[in-house]
């Protein structure tokens, strides 16, 4: 069986669980979740895995851990609703949380979808090393960034309110005055995900576009990890 797109029922389920966020409703509708949400996401992840590993062969190849769970971990959250109304695929390293690993992702919600890559909970060590890398070859970095932007990617980042790098060229400031960052695309509406859909082919092509900047991010992260191990 090959992935040919999602179902209308996929997004109907995600819409409905937002208003029926309780265990009783979920148990009554578990079959819908498995057939229309979980299984298509796992199938898509399995067909993308080879392409993800071509970007980074150290990604976790386990399909089940690459697809998010519908059940939320509410132990440390203010929001105690037990279920998500969105799902994602996240290709990342084994035994790492999403918040601490460079990753490639694809996410669906009741209203739309997104995909991209980045490191979304960056340490100060990483950010300092990243800025140093950018400033060591600004034109090389800008070439990678502008290629992504030309293809519709945006810098997904939390920015500082004040300019912390007043002496760097203006064209570099948007990439340096950030607390963390990634690159992504967002789309409103889900009709182009419903079978027959070309989203599988699109994501395969997008991973090739992501690879050069992802490799830069990952190389910085590896440098930081090696330095920490030496110390």
Image (spheres, helix red, strand yellow):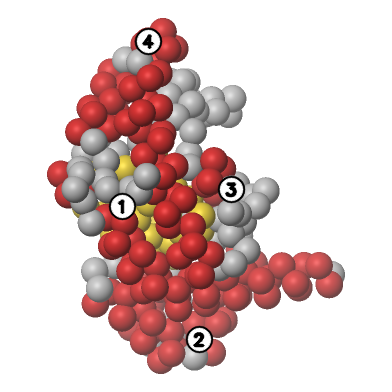
**Mark 3 vs mark 2: which is more N-terminal?**
3
Left or right, residue 81 beside residue 206: right
Q: Can residue 68 be seen in this view?
A: yes
- The mark found on residue 114 in the picture is 1
Q: Is residue 180 visible?
A: no
Q: Of helix, strand and loop, which one carries label 1?
A: strand
Q: Nearer the viewer, residue 144 or 32?
A: 32
- Residue contact between numbered discs 1 and 2, judged by CB atoms under 8 Å: no
- The mark found on residue 135 in the picture is 2
> The N terminus appears in which quarter of the rendering?
top left
Q: In the picture, residue 170 is in which quadrant? A: bottom left
Q: Residues within 10 Å of mark 3 (few under 14, many from 20)?
A: few
Left or right, residue 23 beside residue 223: left
Q: Nearer the viewer, mark 1 or mark 4?
A: 4
Q: Which of 9 and 98 is in front in this view?
A: 9
Q: How crowded is mark 2: few (under 14 residues within 10 Å), some or many (20 or more)?
A: some
Spatial CA span between label 3 and label 2: 37 Å
Residue 20 position, x and y percent, is 32, 15
Spatial CA span between label 1 and label 4: 29 Å
Q: Relative to residue 90, is residue 9 depicted above or below? A: above
**Mark 4 vs mark 3: which is more N-terminal?**
4
- Residue contact between numbered discs 3 and 2, judged by CB atoms under 8 Å: no
Disc 3 target residue: 62
**Mark 1 vs mark 2: which is more N-terminal?**
1
Q: Which of marks 3 and 2 is in front?
A: 3
Q: Of helix, strand and loop, which one carries label 2?
A: helix
- Residue contact between numbered discs 1 and 4, judged by CB atoms under 8 Å: no
Disc 4 target residue: 28
């Amino acid at each position: 069986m090959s992935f040919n797109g999602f179902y209308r029922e996929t997004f109907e389920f995600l819409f409905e669980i937002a208003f029926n966020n309780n265990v009783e409703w979920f148990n009554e509708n578990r079959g819908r979740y498995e057939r229309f949400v979980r299984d298509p996401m796992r199938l898509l992840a399995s067909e993308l895995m080879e392409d993800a590993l071509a970007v980074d062969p150290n990604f976790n190849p386990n399909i089940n851990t690459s697809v998010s769970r519908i059940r939320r971990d509410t132990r440390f959250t203010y929001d105690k609703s037990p279920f998500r109304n969105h799902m994602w695929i996240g290709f990342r390293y084994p035994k790492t949380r999403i918040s601490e690993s460079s990753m490639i992702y694809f996410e669906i919600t009741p209203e739309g979808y997104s995909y991209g890559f980045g490191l979304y909970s960056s340490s100060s060590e990483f950010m300092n090393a990243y800025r140093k890398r950018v400033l060591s070859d600004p034109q090389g970095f800008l070439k990678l960034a502008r290629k992504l932007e030309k293809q519709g990617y945006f810098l997904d980042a939390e920015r500082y309110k004040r300019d912390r790098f007043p002496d760097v060229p203006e064209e570099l400031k948007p990439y340096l005055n950030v607390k963390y960052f990634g690159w992504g695309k967002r789309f409103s509406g889900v009709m182009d995900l419903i079978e027959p859909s070309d989203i599988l082919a699109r994501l395969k092509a997008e991973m090739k576009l992501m690879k050069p900047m992802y490799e830069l991010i990952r190389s910085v992260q590896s440098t930081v990890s090696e330095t920490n191990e030496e110390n």
